[in-house]
Image (cartoon, helix red, strand yellow):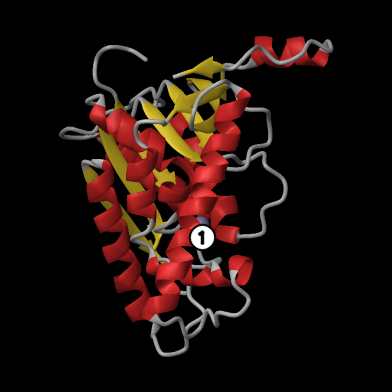
Amino acid sequence: MKSESLNVLAIFAHPDDLTLFCAGTIAKWAEEGHNIYALCVTRGNVGTLRTDLTKKDVAEMREKELRAANKILGVKDTIMLGYPDAGFIDGVKLRESLVYYVRKLKADRVITFDPWFSYEVHPDHVIVRRMAAEASAFAAFPLLYPEQIKNDVAPYACSEVWFMGLLGHVPNCFVDISSTLETKIKAALKFEATLELLAQLFAPDIDPANVSPEELKKLSKYAERLLKSIAITLGKKVNLKASEAFFMQKVLPGYFDNFQQIMMELLGNPPEPPRIY
Ligand SMILES: [Zn+2]
């Protein structure tokens, strides 16, 4: 980690994505003095099995949850692009917006889903991770979207992309989140709509379309246990008490700087040992 403060831009599809996959890291970087920006592409407005809510109700509820969680994590600003949920994103338009935010916020580090993880059915995750990776690599080119370049917006070379969650490559970075795991859990428990969905995983006796306050408490306990067990399992890999894992790529204009690494792997060498942050 460089000693000066970095601008970190987390780009994700739905209000709960960031918190579930990298909140421990985000909280740690915020504590270290880095500027954290969270950009949520959709309103997440179909993310419930309840039938008593409209899309507008769900969108408002989930934005409120996201803002409350981000406050706990120390996020400096939350940007909502406002796309509808579940498969209505125009990728080319989205890339243009993301290039704009990489430039405007001078994002040194982008954190997003991994475009090379294969088993992903959600169309929003598929398009967002791809466009976030492209925007990080292309924001440096002045002839791309030149109309954006005025006032405080200039071409900007993002240095690193960190892929979070389920990865298409073995992790090459582990972040020690032993000091921020509790903060992550506190933030994650703000997402009631997500907790309700967890009923199908942990508590078949609970109807996810009609969760009582008592049942929500039960689901919160299950979610806490799940997040702890993931963090501990990842931590064990690298002798940490709790960890989040990433595949980090250095960014060159228009490319990722992974030529040497890929050549070594093509020749049958095992991946380099992961870095610990
Ligand atoms: Zn999502």
Whether residue 160 is visible? yes
Instruction: Find the residue positioned furthest to the left.
Output: 151
Judging depth in this view, the residue of 183 and 30 nearest the camera is 183
Name the spot of residue 19 as percent of width and height, x first: 41, 49
Instruction: Find the residue positioned furthest to the bottom.
Output: 52
Judging depth in this view, the residue of 14 and 124 nearest the camera is 14
Element on which disc 1 rests: helix
Q: Is residue 31 above or below residue 65?
A: above
Around disc 1, counting alpha carbons within 10 Å, would you say few (fewer than 14), some (14 to 19), or many (20 or more)? Answer: some
Q: Horizontal placement of 194 versus 125: left or right?
A: left
Q: Which residue is mark 1?
A: 222
Q: Residue at x 41, y 26 (%)?
A: 141
Q: Is residue 203 above or below residue 264?
A: below
Name the spot of residue 31 as percent of width and height, x first: 24, 30
Whether residue 99 is visible? no
Q: Residue at x 61, y 60 (%)?
A: 122
Judging depth in this view, the residue of 50 and 250 nearest the camera is 50
Task: Kindly indicate the quadrant of the structure image that contains residue 232.
Answer: top right
Q: Is residue 9 above or below residue 170?
A: below
Q: Which amino acid type is marked by label 1?
A: Tyr
Task: Kindly indicate the quadrant of the structure image that contains residue 24.
Answer: top left
Quarter of the image that includes the N terminus: top left
Q: Residue at x 42, y 20 (%)?
A: 159
